[in-house]
Structures are given as C-alpha cells and as structure tokens.
Amino acid sequence: MFDNRTVTVDVLMAAAAVPGLFPPVKVDGALLVDGGITGRAPVLEALEADATLGRAVVVMSYAPTERGAEPTSMRRALEESFELSMIQQIRRDTELAQLRHPRVNVQLLTPSAPLLLRPLDFDADAMARLLALGRSDALTCLEAWTRR
C-alpha cells in the first residue's frame, strides 16, 4: 500500500503497468502491475490499515448509467461479465467500508457521463475528452467538499 507520502515514480509506473502492454515494475523487490487488472478498489484493506483517516475516496471508472455493448462473441460476453463483477465488488466494498467505519467519510465517485471507452482503447481524441470530463468532475467534487 502506498499513500501520498510513499508514492514514487516507480509506484506510479507500476500502477499503469498492464501485462502484455506495459511491463511490470519492481518496487521494493516486488513486481507490481495495475491492481485493477486482477482486483477491486482496496478500500476495506486501506481502512483496516489506518482507520484514522477522515475521508476515503473510491473512484469508479463507470458512470451509473453506463452500459456495455451487446456482446457479439463469447470473449465479449466474458469481458462484460468480468467488468460487471468488478463494478459490483467495488460498490459492495464501498458500502461495507461505510458500515464498518462510520467515522470515516467513505465516498464513491463516478463519472458524470458514460466514458464510452474500453479499458485498453488508446484513442487520443477520446482520451482528451475523458481528461476534460475528469477535470470537470474533480472540480465539482472539490467545490462540494469545500462547502461542507
């Protein structure tokens, strides 16, 4: 686990490492890859490690209204099933974190609009649109937090 005090360039590179596209990165003797490849948001583990936090933010990369394309192959059906499972695990873990740690403000942030981009699509125009959406959503979120 890393936080704002312990994150390094190697940790950030490991967080972007996708097997088959970007190689794993060795950090403190361990090869690391993007945790989203194999797991869900570790909010429960983070709060078990340090429940003195005032706020935990879980970021979901799917808008609440976003729906996947109709699967046209067995591979696409399996991909959609995997993504749906991950989404439900993240929602469940966020709710469990809220129940188990009532003193921590646990929030699930979702995009304000569907992203309409597959996880490994590297379309420059779409990524620019998503960066603008993310910036707008983040500013909206920060404004709401500062009003409290």
Image (cartoon, rainbow, N blue to C red):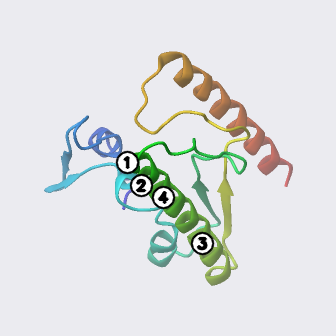
Tell me which amino acid carries mark 3. Arg
Q: Are marks 1 and 2 in contact (CB under 8 Å)?
A: yes
Q: Quadrant of residue 135?
A: top right
* Rendered location of residue 79, percent (x, y): 43, 50
In screen coordinates, is 148 left or right of 61?
A: right
Instruction: Provide the residue designation for mark 4.
Output: 81
Q: Residue furthest bottom?
A: 100
Q: Nearer the viewer, mark 1 or mark 3?
A: 1
Q: Are marks 1 and 4 in contact (CB under 8 Å)?
A: no
Cα–Cα span, label 1 and label 2: 5 Å
Cα–Cα span, label 2 and label 4: 5 Å
Picture quarter with the N terminus: bottom left
Q: Are marks 1 and 3 in contact (CB under 8 Å)?
A: no
Tell me the crowding category of disc 2: few under 14, some 14 to 19, or many 20 or more residues within 10 angstroms, Cα based: few
Q: Residue furthest top?
A: 125
Disc ID at residue 78 = 2
Tell me which amino acid carries mark 4. Ser
Instruction: Provide the residue designation for mark 3.
Output: 92
